[in-house]
Image (cartoon, rainbow, N blue to C red):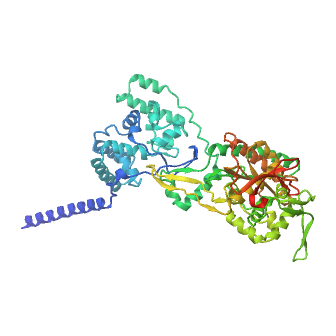
Amino acid sequence: MQKQHWLLLSIALVGIFFGILAGAFFSLVHDLPQINSLKQFKPSSVTTVFSSDKQILARFYIEKRFPVSIKKIPKDLINAIITIEDRHFYSHTGVNLKAIIRAIVHDIKAGGFKQGASTLTQQLVKTLFLTPEKSIVRKIKEAILTIQIERRYTKNEIMELYLNLIYFGSGTYGVEAACQAYFGKSVEDITLVESALIAGLPKAPSIYSPLKNPDLALKRRQIVLKQMLATNVITQQEYLLAKSQKILTPPQKPNLGQAAYFIEYIKGDLKNHFDLKSTYSSGLNIHTTLNFDFQKTANKSVANRMLELETRMKKKGLDSSKAQCALIAMDIKTGGILSMIGGKKFSISAYNRAVQAKRQPGSAFKPFVYATAIEQGFSQNDKLLDAALSYQLANGKTWQVNNFSKTYSGEITFRKALALSKNTPVVRLIERIGPSNVIEFAKKAGISSKLYSNLSLALGTSEVSLIELTASYIPFANMGVKIEPYSINKIADSDSRIIYQNTSNKQSIMSRQNAAVMANLLKAVILEGTGKKARIIQKDIAGKTGTTDNYKDALFIGFSPDIVVGVWVGNDDSKTLGNYETGARAALPIWIDYMRNTLLNKSYQYFDIPDGTKMVYMNPNTGEVTRDQTYGKVKVLIRAKDLK
């Protein structure tokens, strides 16, 4: 009876033991991640931002990775990885038992987890699914997952995932990113010696990175080459040739700083359309509106002309350290932003003065007053009085309206008053047509900032941003059609599917005839007025200078039939730029440089002359219109109904 009792007890204990083991096993298996969808797994990858002319502007990423097919990975690199990391990769079932036993014996002697015994598949499992902790439980989980992956996926599929996921140092993940960082080329173009260097990195990426420790990288590369020779992967001749090659100085990174302000701007656009964090890791291709050649022209012009301004300021004893500039250019037909500069140097100040800053536009606001009048039926040959003007204010003070020239011309035409940027005529005009009507038109044109309904509005006393001011000139050149500016044309996912496509937001805000008259009026600024310096361009162009009190702000907003460009120059602290630093002197030269270069290779285009308008000759002082040119007459566009 006693023997039978002990037999039953033994059986029960064995059952409990195996039950505990089974429970522990099923608990581990139940807690393991699913690997069924590994084929559909897409690792975090780099999102690339392109200009409209297919130049790379920036790369966004959480992990810098460019996934590639194993078909593009050279055989030398695969052989090098297998030789140094897992020689029996193509023959084992995922777990190398001999290596594990050898590592366990070593760990027991060392008194802890000192030596690894991971196959490539195990390394992949750790990267994909597990934490880096060292414990028996984690090792068991790792082994189970490794065997599952080996059963369900081919060796080439496992190798492809491994080479695209593993960290290779210096912020690079996957072989493609590593090859671009270390050699300036794609993985499919690397040599044997470069393959050996890449293969040596996974053991200790930060230590063996050639960017950080070229000497250690060289030693590690030589070990890989020696092992490849020992396993007959390469010949003695290949080994000697590869061994003798030096580690070259890493290639310089492409200059991705040409459009830093624009890149920050589109990040804001991305926030509106996508989750920013997921965008950075989704491997998207973002195609923007920016023209890279135009942007380089803008950068060069701003750098050169701001240096000239700073030199003038220093000669006058002024602090030039806070002098800044902003430029924005847009495609008139689409609203696409072609160039953007938000300051002299992004690395010093990321504040985007083209978008975020609001300053007084000065006389650059006057076109909206004249456009409102044209909409109400006035003609550019109508006359305004240019004479001394003052108003008694409610607080008892007197507002004296002064011309910049301090002189008066008596009765002059709309055209001459705008061309010479006269102040007293435009204030009289806004009083006549009503500030509220001017505000209504300016809002329709694209001004979103608050505009104050007073007579000084005509002189640009309400603050606006450069981007809204510049975009609001578009209707004058675009047949009366307003277009909202935008920065992204389209976004494609990693499989080249279009997931976002911009559609231009257009709205007609004035008649085609009135818009053409306004373009012609603004052309007078260059042909006959404050923008005469721009005549050097010898193309159909128009625009308006702007200068604020005490020379705090200098602007020029101008356009051709297809491009509108706004330039602002001023001090961040709103102090003076110096006497006579007007829009014509401080801002216009930048605008001229930009337009000369961008229009250089473009065919000559003319501003719109629609049905219902006629080109005639006019006396700019009296407004007298003739069909023949005589001395002192200027060529103007007038609505046919105004000639009767």
**Quadrant of the rendered structure where residue 465 is?**
bottom right
Q: Is residue 290 left or right of residue 388?
A: left
Task: Please say if 151 is above or below 403.
Answer: above
In which quadrant will I find the C terminus? Answer: bottom right
Task: Please say if 539 is above or below 21.
Answer: above
Determine if residue 22 is in view. yes
Exactly how many numbered labels are in the figure?
0
Determine if residue 568 is in view. no
Image spot of residue 213 (x, y percent) = 54, 38
Q: Is residue 512 left or right of residue 285?
A: right
Q: Nearer the viewer, residue 412 or 397?
A: 412
Q: Residue furthest top?
A: 237
Image spot of residue 467 (x, y percent) = 68, 58
Image spot of residue 33 (x, y percent) = 34, 58
Image spot of residue 40 (x, y percent) = 36, 52
Residue at horizontal 38%, vertical 48%?
A: 124
